[in-house]
Image (cartoon, grey):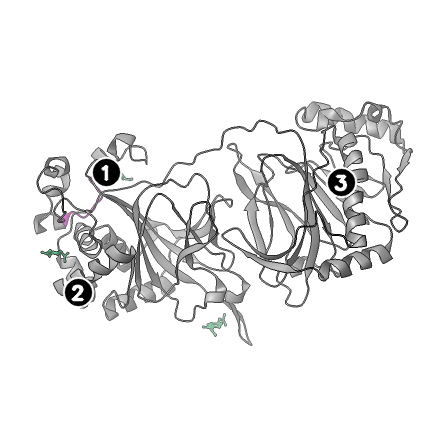
Amino acid sequence: MCLISLLHFVCLVCVIAAPLDWSHHMRAQGAQGTGSKKQQALEVQSNINRVFTSINCLFCPVYFFKESIVLDPVPFHHCLIPNFIQSQDFLEGLQKELLNLDFHEKCNDLYKFKQSDDLKKRKEPHISALRKLLFEEFRVWLSDVTQVELKPTIDLSCAKYEYTDTLLCHDDELEGRRIAFILYLVPPWDKSDGGTLDLFSTDEHSQPQQVVKSLVPSWNSLVFFEVSPVSFHQVSEVLSKGKCRLSVSGWFHGPSVTRPPRYTESLLPRNPHIPYDHEILYEWINPVYLDMDSQAQIQEEFEDRSETLLKDFLKKEKFQQVCEALEKEDIKWTSRGPPNKRFYERAEEGSLPDVLRECMELFHSEALFLLLSNFTGLKLHFLASSEDDDEGEEEDSTESAGCSSSKCKGEPSQEANGSTEKSGEVPESEEGSSVPMCVGELRRWTNGHYTLVHDTQKAEFALDLLFFCGCEAWDVKYGGFTSYIAKGEDEELLTVQPENNCLALVYKDRETLKFVKHVNHHSLKQTKTNHSRSRFWDFSFVYYE
Ligand SMILES: *[C@@H]1O[C@H](CO)[C@@H](O)[C@H](O)[C@H]1NC(C)=O
Ligand SMILES: *[C@@H]1O[C@H](CO)[C@@H](O)[C@H](O)[C@H]1NC(C)=O
Ligand SMILES: *[C@@H]1O[C@H](CO)[C@@H](O)[C@H](O)[C@H]1NC(C)=O
């Protein structure tokens, strides 16, 4: 086999097919193959005798095996170096030092794992040697082969992922980060142990689509990849109950590159209420909540705390019917992404059996807008009392005003959308106008589902409504709870646990963000005969004054 001509071919493909990114920065002598046998010996400390092979065409758009280094530009440039460090003694010493560090539980919308103290200044001999290896010799080599000028900035830590730990889909982009790397120090590891480094493909808006490659961690292998607007990846949930996925990871920093503007997705369509009179409330809702005194009490509490939980919200028999329909009926569920923002299933409204369709309508109904106004003191209907105005707004709401009586009950369709909703989004001019809107969906939650806080989440005042079904055996440790946090902080303001027949109302201000915690493997109940997948459902609505 003529290596030189192979290299020629590889590099030609690379120039033609991928003229962007790093591929056109390949070293000049690569094209001539002169470096193919040349080895660059790098003396690190006495106990590390790693020899780096000089690579000629590092990021070519084909698989490229050479001296056991694996390069692949799909779905984005990444590289795997097995047996990164030669000395087993060194590795074992390193592992021992790392495991002796203090680890801190890290947990938010995006991840759950344990992280060590910063390794920037640790004095342990093996850790210091690794730091020197990575940020001196290896960095120089990497700069050379990628032609990216990497700074000596040290950005290094150690992570421990154990059963149910995960790091969900993200792109790593942060000022200055150019190349991410991970060195694995794991026991013999199988794909079924989870904890794989999953790489996502992206769509035309550079939004992640699906996992197209999973790298199974292995002892002493090093993975690195270019941080870019499309470098979406995740650490899949660790499924092994006994093994610890230990790794050292960090970033090489370099000159900032200009990023394309972030893609803003279109929002789900908002609708005004559906005309329905009070009958629907008496039909569905626990009469306790229709009593004026209890409404006044709920409102007082809500105005104080901006949240309330209403237990046994639906009448028992109605709740029963809803649960049975959810379990038995043939409902079409579709996954909602993209994975850097959310992953759960949403019911297609057209596939809903009558009882669930009616339940959705209840949450959309004019009568419920009024009831929520009474619960919260918000003005979700022009008739709702309000301290500062009485008449002024009626004219703006003629559409709904004409329908506030039972005359309209025969037409509970979303016919009002013609005038108030255009192409799925509320026009800017509608904001601040007096037509209250809502958006809602029926969702199913099982292992692997979550939503993330993301920067395109619109900052606006809103009332969140969550109503839960099918969660009798749900446990906090499964995840699936909704967490409210203050913008820019990890600290939780409020957590809403899924609870059967319970209605949660939360008023969000512009500084409040929310997410649903990743539903982890604890939720798979293992019986002797089968693995039944625990799940719950919620009706999730948001109301805008
Ligand atoms: C809301 O409260 C008002 C009294 O303040 C009452 O007349 C009305 O019936 C209540 N609405 C609902 C839906 O309970
Ligand atoms: C309302 O929207 C639905 C789908 O979103 C559409 O099928 C229907 O024709 C619309 N109605 C009016 C009156 O525009
Ligand atoms: C699995 O177990 C659950 C609960 O124990 C049971 O309801 C279900 O019918 C079982 N499924 C199968 C396919 O055996």
Residue 119 vs residue 516, the one in the foreground: 119
- Left or right, 214 with respect to 286, comes to right
Where is residue 439? Give x, y as percent: 30, 46
Estimate the spatial distance between the alpha carbons at disc 3 and disc 2, rounded to whole Å.
65 Å
Disc on res. 197: none
Rendered residue at 40%/51% (across/down) = 346
Q: Quadrant of the C terminus?
A: top left
- State yes or no: discs 1 and 3 in contact (Cβ < 8 Å): no
Disc on res. 417: 1
Mark 3 CB within 8 Å of ligand 3: no
Residue 429 visible in this rendered orientation of the protein: yes
Quick check: is 411 in the magenta stretch? Answer: yes
Which type of secondary structure does the marked residue at label 1 adopt? helix
Which residue lies under the disc numbered 3? 135
Q: Nearer the viewer, mark 2 or mark 1?
A: 2
Magenta-tinted stretch: 410-416
Mark 1 CB within 8 Å of ligand 2: yes
Mark 2 CB within 8 Å of ligand 1: no
Disc on res. 294: 2
Residue 253 vs residue 75, the one in the foreground: 253
- Left or right, 68 with respect to 491, comes to right
Chief secondary structure of the magenta portion: loop
